[in-house]
Image: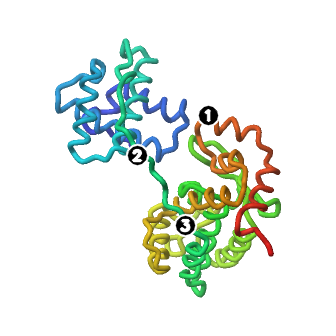
Amino acid sequence: MRYELSNTQIVGNAILRRYVQYLRLERSYTPNTLDAYLKDLQKLLNYYSDEGIDFRQVTLKQLDGFAKALQELGVGPRSVARILSGVRSFYRFLTIEKEVETDPTELLESPKLGKHLPEVLSLPEIDAIEAAIDLSKPEGVRDLAIVEVLFSCGLRISELCSLKLSELYLEEGYIRVHGKGRKERLVPIGDSAIDRLRQWFVVRQGCKVKPGEEDFVFVSLRRGKRLSRISLFVYIKEYAAKAGIRKNISPHTFRHSFATQLLEGGANLRAIQAMLGHEDIGTTEIYMHVDKTHLRREILEHHPRNIRD
């Protein structure tokens, strides 16, 4: 079984088994999100085990002690806040299931976070990264298409790695994306990214792709399987280093850059939020009322890759 909780055997514990089912089925969490939640929950259960605490009888004071213990171990404020968010989710579930009488996390405070501004890339920096890609190699043709799609569509790394050929509507100028919580959205794609994708498709025809992997857009030329998030992360880091960029960037940096460039170009903030596929209720509600034709117009009018002289 992929999801394991070391000190509390998930197979033998009905409460934890139901919680996993709740996250998977009711909350529609992806395997990656579910993995992260359960790893954080494992930290809590390990702490309870060491302190001899029954997780169904925990107090606010004991939860504060857990948060303090994390900080003393050198866990950063942002990571502590994320872990405590998972703890709150767990106890909300226990309250719903009437496994605890009251939710002990109601007054649990997360560490204060300073304003965190993500790294973004300027257009010259993105051009420099693309110039560092060797187009004489098949991998280079693929990787340039990856960079263009990341910047053109603002995708998460997991969304790009799971992108399928059957989800591309290049003639219409859209791709279908599976976001967090398995929610689908249509995202406009610009002409430059479409051109690079078509160049990659020519190269891709000569690739030996393993059975079951044929529909993935971006595949490893050596393994014949879809690219992993780790591989993509490494490639982006290498190209940035070759381009002489010292910023701490990742594939997600292109997502931030996508939003920043659109906003600076005058695009509507609501359209940007919709294209990013944010999960919060307000953003989701906004997306429901934004016409997809308008979204494509926003991309064509304001994304720098589509502005013609």
Locate residue 289: give its quadrant: top right
Residue 207 versus residue 31 in the image, above or below: below
Kind of residue at disc 2: Gly
Q: Residue at x 68, y 48 (%)?
A: 269
Tag 1: Cα neighbours inside 10 Å, few (<14), some, or many (≥20)? Answer: few
Q: Residue at x 70, y 45 (%)?
A: 270
Q: Quadrant of the C terminus?
A: bottom right
Q: How far across and how far down the image is residue 60, in percent?
A: 29, 22
Q: How far across and how far down the image is residue 93, in percent?
A: 44, 23
Residue 164: mark in rendering = none
Q: Which numbered disc, 3 or 2, marks the residue closer to the eye?
A: 2
Tag 2: Cα neighbours inside 10 Å, few (<14), some, or many (≥20)? Answer: few
Which one is earlier in the sequence, the residue at label 1 or at label 2? 2
Which one is earlier in the sequence, the residue at label 3 or at label 2? 2
Marks 3 and 2 sit apart, C-alpha to C-alpha, by 22 Å
Q: Nearer the viewer, residue 275 or 232?
A: 275
Which one is earlier in the sequence, the residue at label 3 or at label 1? 3
Marks 3 and 1 sit apart, C-alpha to C-alpha, by 29 Å
Q: Which residue is mark 2?
A: 114
Residue 44 versus residue 150 in the image, above or below: above
Residue 281: mark in rendering = 1
Locate residue 237: give its quadrant: bottom left
Kind of residue at disc 1: Ile
Q: Secondary structure at mark 1?
A: helix
